[in-house]
Image: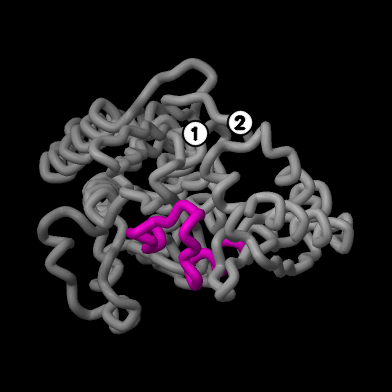
């Protein structure tokens, strides 16, 4: 059985080009057993010919292989995206599959409005503006948006309400908006709030912003503008709170995703924690579906391939097991 599968793979490998692409292994009924990507198709498929270097799971897959298909792509990135889409569509039994495959949310600030709005965004990043993330969950991004609103007073109301300019939103009275919807702030002043929020979300550094708030607070106190001073005090407190509770300080690591894998009674959990600009963007548990013969290294590698197929890869990825890739 295995020999037949090897012969099919050997014959197919001789026809493959030295280009990136995706390959499929199929059983005698045409069911797809496995979908993989390759930087060089011919080299990757030839790796299946050395049985002694393969796990029991891969050997079993080869024994069931009766035919192969392949797709040539222009780049390795195209191969990664195609592999991800085909796995989602066909759900091959020997691939690692993700049950929760929703795109991660981002914070989005538009650049196409005089008074940009801060909002949650999912899906393709086609609108013009700034994107921050990814966040691990809607709760994580909602908490961050709420905090950013308290600190930088960015609006969340609709463009229609702002363009009308004749009615203040409820957030203004809660001291969570600078009031562009009621003409309470100029375009120039609002752009400075956007710049400060961008600096904080992009770098995670709040020292400059804290100093600015502190200076403004003392100036307001000196001229007996105690309402403004109290507002600045509250914004400063919110900024210090998010820095103390969400920041991490790891030498030489600023942007990182950290994954830990464990299994119990045949079920596997991979927990991911996500950090950008020394700030926690939350954590999330994943429960991948996989063949029972996969070991932790194979599961983790398969998970990471699918997870990052359509996401930006951070500077550092840390796992609790060693993986070869």
What type of secondary structure mainly makes up the magenta span? loop
> What residue is drawn where x is 37% and y is 32%?
260
Q: Position of residue 109 (x, y in %)?
A: 42, 61
User: Residue 207, percent across and down?
Assistant: 38, 27
Which sits in the foreground, 177 or 246?
A: 246
Disc 1 or 2, which lies upstream in sequence?
A: 1
- Determine whether 222 is above or below 175 in the image: above
**Quadrant housing residue 64:** bottom right
- Residue at 35 percent across and 37 percent down: it is 273
The residue range painted magenta reads 83-107
Mark 1 neighbour density, 10 Å: few (under 14) some (14–19) many (20 or more): some
* 139 relative to 39 in the view: left or right: left
Residue at the spot 45% in from the left edge and 35% down from the top edge: 295
Question: Pointer 1 and pointer 2: residues touching (CB < 8 Å)?
Answer: yes
- Residue 141, position as x, y percentages in the image: 29, 52
Q: Nearer the viewer, residue 119 or 249?
A: 249
Extreme front residue here?
A: 1
Residue nearest the viewer, comparing 273 with 37 = 37
Q: Which quarter of the picture shows residue 26? A: bottom right
Q: Which mark is residue 297?
A: 1
Under circle 2, the secondary element is loop
Dot 1: element: helix
Which numbered circle lies on residue 324? Answer: 2
């Amino acid at each position: 059985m295995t020999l037949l599968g090897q012969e099919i793979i050997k014959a197919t490998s001789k026809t493959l080009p030295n280009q990136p692409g995706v390959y499929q292994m199929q059983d005698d009924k045409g069911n797809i057993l496995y979908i993989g990507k390759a930087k060089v198709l011919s080299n990757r498929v030839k790796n299946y010919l050395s049985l002694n270097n393969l796990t029991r799971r891969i050997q079993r897959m080869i024994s069931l292989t009766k035919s192969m298909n392949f797709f040539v792509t222009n780049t390795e990135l195209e191969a990664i995206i195609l592999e991800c889409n085909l796995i989602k569509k066909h759900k091959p039994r020997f691939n690692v599959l993700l049950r929760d495959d929703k795109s991660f949310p981002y914070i989005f600030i538009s650049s196409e409005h005089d008074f940009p709005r801060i909002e949650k965004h999912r899906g393709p990043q086609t609108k013009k503006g700034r994107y921050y993330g990814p966040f691990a969950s809607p709760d994580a991004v909602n908490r961050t948006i709420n905090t950013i609103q308290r600190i930088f007073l960015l609006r969340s109301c609709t463009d229609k309400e702002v363009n009308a300019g004749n009615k203040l939103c409820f957030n203004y009275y809660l001291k969570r908006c600078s009031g562009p919807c009621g003409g309470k702030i100029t375009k120039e002043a609002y752009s400075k709030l956007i710049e400060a929020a961008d600096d904080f979300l992009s770098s995670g550094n709040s020292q400059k912003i804290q100093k600015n708030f502190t200076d403004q607070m003392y100036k307001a106190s000196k001229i007996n503008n105690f309402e403004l001073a109290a507002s600045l005090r509250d914004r400063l407190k919110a900024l210090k709170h998010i820095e103390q509770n969400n920041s991490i300080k790891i030498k030489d690591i600023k942007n990182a995703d950290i994954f830990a894998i464990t299994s119990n009674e045949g079920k596997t959990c991979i927990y991911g924690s996500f950090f950008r600009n020394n700030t926690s963007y939350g954590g999330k548990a994943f429960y991948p579906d996989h063949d029972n013969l996969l070991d932790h290294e194979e599961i983790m590698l398969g998970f990471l391939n699918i997870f990052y197929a359509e996401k930006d890869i951070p500077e550092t990825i840390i796992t609790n097991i060693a993986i070869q890739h």
